[in-house]
Image (cartoon, rainbow, N blue to C red):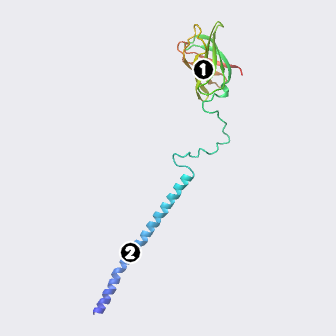
Amino acid sequence: MRTRNGERAGQGHDLAQAPTVTATATAGTKRRLSCTLVLTITGALAAATTALFVFDLLPGGDGGKTARPPAATAPQPPTGTLPKEFIGTWTGSVIQSDGTPNGTMTSTVTAGGPGAYVVRTSYSVLGVLECRSKAKLTSVAGGKITLEEVTDGEKTALCTGEKATVTYSLAADGKLAFTSDDPRGGRPTATLTRTGG
């Protein structure tokens, strides 16, 4: 009896343990799958991160700036350099902001960068009064240059002698549009035509 009970007990014990073993095996399989899945994801992330560093695509990298420029891109002048289209001698009639004519002006524009005096201008009224100025390049933006204008040499009687901000803008017809913020000079404007190289 004991033996049979023991056998039965043992068999019962084995049967009772079987689901546990199966459960353990199943749990072990699930753990293996989970570990495999985690390792697979970790490997993929490591590979992606390595690729980002290798190809320099992370923020703070140059983001591919070292790539060759497109073949069709025209060469641009260095930032702030005076575009060659402005270089030459330009002349035109000066008009104050209230519409009053104020003689003529002739500007000679030469090559240069920011901080250089690239424009020298003479303002003439009836060929009797002449004022001379020079202008230092402060910025270049598209087809427009901005300069700081001051008297060139000694101030002449009836010339304002004021420091002013002036602009020259390229027009579609090949002319230059001139503006000045000189209040004593009547905030003059002019349309200038090229007269020489």
Which image quarter: residue 73? top right
Q: Quadrant of the N terminus?
A: bottom left
Furthest-front residue in this view: 154
From the viewer's side, name the closer residue of 190 and 85.
85
Q: Quadrant of the C terminus?
A: top right
Characterize the local packing of mark 2: few (<14), some (14-19) or many (20 or more) Cα atoms within 10 angstroms: few
Q: CA distance from mark 1 to mark 2?
A: 89 Å
Considering the numbered disc 1 on the image, is that residue within a helix, a strand or a loop? strand
Mark with earlier residue (1, 2)? 2
Q: Which residue is mark 1?
A: 135
The residue sitting at 45% across, 63% down in the picture is: 38
Above/below status of 65 relative to 36: above
From the viewer's side, name the closer residue of 15 and 164.
164
Characterize the local packing of mark 1: few (<14), some (14-19) or many (20 or more) Cα atoms within 10 angstroms: many
Residues marked 1 and 2 touching at CB (< 8 Å): no
Above/below status of 172 relative to 44: above
Which image quarter: residue 86? top right
Considering the numbered disc 2 on the image, is that residue within a helix, a strand or a loop? helix
The residue sitting at 63% across, 20% down in the picture is: 119
Circle number at residue 100? none
Furthest-left residue in this view: 1
Answer with left or right where residue 179 lies relative to residue 194. Answer: left
Q: Which residue is mark 2?
A: 24
Residue type pointed to by label 2: Thr
Residue type pointed to by label 1: Ala
Q: Please state which of the two labelled residues, at mark 1 or mark 2, is closer to the viewer.
A: 1
Furthest-right residue in this view: 197
Where is residue 102 drawn, in percent x and y? Answer: 60, 10
Where is residue 96 drawn, in percent x and y? Answer: 57, 13
Which image quarter: residue 149? top right
